[in-house]
Amino acid sequence: MLDYEYLLHLVSCAVNDLQPKEKPDGVSFLNVFTLGKAHEVANIAFLSVERLKAKPEKELYGEWKIYYYLAVQRDMRQRLAYEEITEALHKNRIRTLEAQGTVTKTLYPSSELRMMSDIDLIIDFENLEAAKGIMQSLGYSTSQKQEGEFDAVLEDGFLVEFHTEFFAEYMFNRKERYYEAINTPFSHAVEAGPMRYVLTDDYYFLFTVIHTIVHFETAGCGIRRILDLFYLKKAYDGRINRRLVDEIIDKNELRSAYDKLFALEAKWFENVPSPIDLSETEADIINSGNHGVSEIFIRNNVRKDEREGVKFARLKQVYGFVFPPKEFIYLNYPECRERGYSTLRCRLYRVYKTLKRFSFSHALGVIKTMLKSK
């Protein structure tokens, strides 16, 4: 058994309330813990570790236990912040729509088990500026990511993201089919309280699945997102309009990813053999961590271009990496947008920031990955 397989075993036993097997020879508790943190499931795996006879050595066990309680603390802080923020917004007649982690948490046996990197809120486009002012009055600094979105951050890095759509219409100068699949959030929502909206069952299911597919097809998604599908299926089977779901998934060419992700969920957490080959899917998800990696991002972009008949797809990706469009740089370096930099100044600024973070050999490594992508 490999380290990642034992991590999956611990997580599966925790969510299915089963007694885990003792650690096999050749498996490292340290590696399992490190991988669990990268996928934000180490806190769930700890519930199984607690049931082992032979636990990790004292120092590592203590660190793992602290990680679990920090997840509890993070959950409490995020829930309190969510209530404070939405109360301030609602008082100012700004309606909010719950999506992503704040709802997915409710599907888990206990909310702290589903870790969130940040809080996500959807509001109406015309309320963006007012929402920025409210967040600033609560002590957050704000910055625009792209049109229709902004971030609000506290000094310690505590992050809240505001959106006006489920997905961006364009990404890297390419119209995204995810936007075509599902958009105009409030048209798929019902009021759950004064100024507080939630998605209907059909569209919450669709949004969660498509959001996972976006990550999977872009740069990879981690174990936590596959676990989300386990709880999503458990909660929504029999409650959704399957015909509507299938129609939207098929129409927007999402079937292949949909089938792979749910087959992997069933294999990992329901012990159901897969009818399709999942070797690359499984490897991508394990290697991507919770937020994806550049190698998968590059490979997937090359594949996308080649499927669309783009000539010299690899060279096109290299050119885009060396000379990215201004909007891409604005997205990754909001300060360039705020300063009104031209395309040339944006590119020079990006080179300066990149060389501060990485070596020239790193950039060459990225280019080699583009050229070798299959």
Image: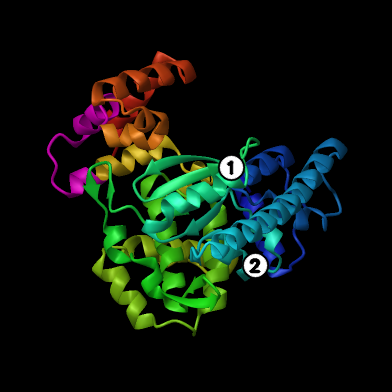
Provide residue 270's location: percent of width, then percent of height: 58, 69
Q: Residue 26 is drawn in which quadrant?
A: top right
Tag 1 residue: 140
Measured Cα–Cα span from mark 1 to mark 2: 29 Å
The quadrant of the picture occupied by the C terminus is: top left
In the picture, measured across the screen, residue 291 lies left or right of residue 139, that is: left
Residue 366 falls within the magenta-colored stretch = no
Tell me where residue 262 appears, x and y as whole percent.
46, 66
Helix, strand or loop at label 1? It is loop
| Labelled disc at residue 93 | none
- The answer to whether marks 1 and 2 mark residues whose Cβ atoms lie closer than 8 Å is no
Front one among 2 and 353: 353
Instruction: Identify the magenta region.
Output: 304-325
Residue positioned 41% across, 34% down in the render: 334
- Specify the farthest residue to the front: 92
Residue at x 43%, y 20% (from the top left corner): 353
Is residue 312 on the magenta stretch?
yes
